[in-house]
């Protein structure tokens, strides 16, 4: 169905934006990111989507990561933290997002 392709394209960029918004508030680990995104079904994503995205954000220098031991006796978790470069990127994304919303609302209101 054509709408599914459109939704997939919109979701891809929006997931990156939402993950950076989340991690900008505090460090998260991968599974925790997936659970948080599941709160909004439209943002729900599988491991095969989230982990490659996190790896790319790390490679691009927008995130850093560190392993932390758990208190529950579970395996260590890899926490992601936003970098200064990531904050600059997020700020640019926020600006563009605002521009996009303004344009769409303007067109819709015509």
Image (cartoon, rainbow, N blue to C red):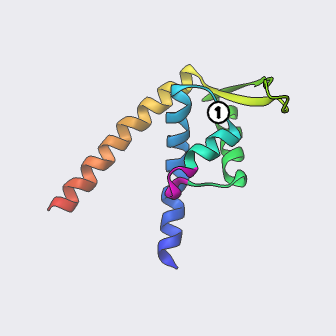
For the point 68% across and 55% down, which residue is it? 46
**Circle 1 sits on which residue?**
60
Mark 1 lies on a secondary structure that is loop
Find the residue positioned furthest to the left.
110
User: Along the horizontal axis of the image, is 34 left or right of 12?
Assistant: right
Please report the residue visible at 71 percent of the width from the left and 39 percent of the height from the top: 55
Q: Callout 1: few (<14), some (14-19), or many (20+) C-alpha neighbours within 10 Å?
A: few
Q: Which segment is the magenta one?
A: 38-43
User: Which residue: 52% across, 71% down?
Assistant: 4
In this view, 16 is above or below 87: below
Determine the residue located farthest toward the front in the rendered image: 72
Above or below — where is 25 with respect to 8? Answer: above
Residue 56 lies, in percent from the top left, at: 68, 40
Q: Residue furthest bottom?
A: 1
Q: Main secondary structure of the magenta part?
A: helix
Q: Position of residue 57 (x, y in %)?
A: 64, 36
Quarter of the view holding residue 95: top left
Q: How many marks?
A: 1
Please state which of residues 56 and 1 is positioned toward the viewer in this rendering.
1
Q: Is residue 60 above or below residue 47?
A: above
The question of residue 60 being in magenta is answered with no
Q: Quadrant of the C terminus?
A: bottom left
Instruction: Tell me if 32 is positioned left or right of 16 in this view.
Output: right
Point out residue 67 in the picture as x, y percentages from the top left corner.
78, 25
Image coordinates of residue 80 in percent, x first then y, are: 66, 29
Q: Residue at x 49, y 49 (%)?
A: 14
């Amino acid at each position: 169905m054509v709408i599914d392709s459109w939704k997939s394209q919109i979701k891809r960029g929006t997931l990156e934006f939402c993950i950076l918004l989340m991690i900008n508030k505090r460090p998260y680990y991968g599974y925790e990111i997936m659970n948080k995104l599941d709160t909004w079904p439209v943002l729900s994503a599988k491991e095969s989507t989230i982990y490659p995205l996190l790896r790319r954000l790390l490679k691009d220098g927008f995130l850093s990561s560190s392993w932390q031991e758990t208190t529950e006796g579970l395996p260590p978790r890899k926490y992601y933290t936003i970098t200064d470069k990531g904050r600059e990127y997020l700020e640019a994304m926020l600006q563009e997002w605002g521009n996009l919303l303004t344009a769409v609302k303007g067109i819709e209101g015509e």
